[in-house]
Image (cartoon, grey):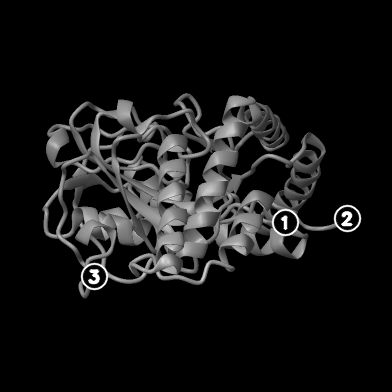
Amino acid sequence: MNGRLYLDWNATAPLRPEARAAMIEAMEVVGNPSSVHAEGRAAKALMEKSRARIAAALGAEGADIVFTSGATEAAALALAGRGFACAAVEHEAVAAWCDAGLAVDALGQVAVTEPARTALQLANSETGVVQPLPQGLAVSDLTQAFGKLPIAFNWLGCDMGLISAHKLGGPKGIGALVLRRGLGVSPQQRGGGAEMGCRAGTENLIGIAGFAAAAEAAARDLAAGVWEEVAEVRNILDSALSSGANNTISVGKGAERLPNTLCLIAPGWKGETQVMAMDLAGVAVSAGSACSSGKVRASKVLTAMGYDEGLAAQAIRISIGPGVSRSDVERFADVWLAAYARARSRAA
């Protein structure tokens, strides 16, 4: 293959040029946003302008946006000590704070009984399956959906949302908790009054500026139909792999999925081995959520959907984005199918 292919956008998306430019510009802003002098006021103005830009991109005008180090910290801020329910398909950052006992069907859909006491993701990072959110939901992890699906926080009917910049082409290390206006949370990080008293510490102004620029660029892409084109490319890949190896399983097919995500089970070929084989062939894919990679165990998302541990351990996730072309995924399909045939031959 000529050059590497990056097909792991759900782990982190490439940094958008708009975000890079905004971060470089923000590096020249010297003040602390909490300082009252002119330099501090300039930093504060940039931060609040960025906050408003993110809110507009998310359809969260009028909501409170509390900046954090990422969606994982936002989850802790939203969920710690509340005793909420969730399903095992949630990201570890959410499941760590909840009773992960809600039922999940074969398509990855979660049965919610008490929305006001429940955390439910909008889209799954491993399978791409999109959940219908019930009105009155307490918390929704919007991390994978923000920037890929046309959503508006104000219309989702949930009290709190979790978002992260690097999933939509912003910098790593910055995210936010989105709160319905007037809703309070207990700070987990103490020591000052920043972020409306919800999160102590000097704000990451450079990251915040990059986040805002990436969010606006993502909103423009959505309006221009870019992710519809991504879905077409994903479907071409899905068809090529399933027709070339008819014993594979495309997880979540039949449910609404993120436009860029394909979770594929290849019976007889461990997911971690697939990832290594593709890496050697010049392709970056994953065996599940980046936050749980490196752990030799079956995906809890897939076992929650009813797959046995053997099959669940034989899955990979291919996640693409704008700029990944039909020829790119066809090249990947050729390499993957040849490697799978070799793997099956050795196992025979």
* Residue labelled with disc 2: 2
Pick the quarter of the image with the C terminus: bottom right
Could you tell whether 174 is left or right of 98 in the image? right
Q: Name the residue under label 3.
A: 189
**Amino acid beneath label 3:** Gln
Residue 235 percent across, percent down from the top left: 65, 29
Work out whether residue 176 or residue 234 is closer to the camera in this orientation and state it: 176
Tag 1–tag 2 contact (CB < 8 Å): no
Q: Residue at x 73, y 41 (%)?
A: 323
Whichever of labels 3 and 2 marks the residue nearer the N terminus, that label is 2
Q: Mark 2 Cα within 10 Å, few/some/many (few <14, many 20+)?
A: few
Q: Which numbered disc flags the more N-terminal residue, 1 or 2?
A: 2
Q: Which of 286 and 46 is in front in this view?
A: 46
User: At 52% from the left edge and 64% from the top edge, which residue is drawn?
Assistant: 206
Q: What element carries label 1?
A: strand
Query: How far is mark 1 from mark 3, CA to CA?
Result: 39 Å
**Residue 168 visible within the image:** no
Mark 3 Cα-neighbour bin, 10 Å: few <14, some 14–19, many ≥20: some
Q: Name the residue under label 1.
A: 283
Please tell me which of labels 1 and 3 falls first in the chain: 3
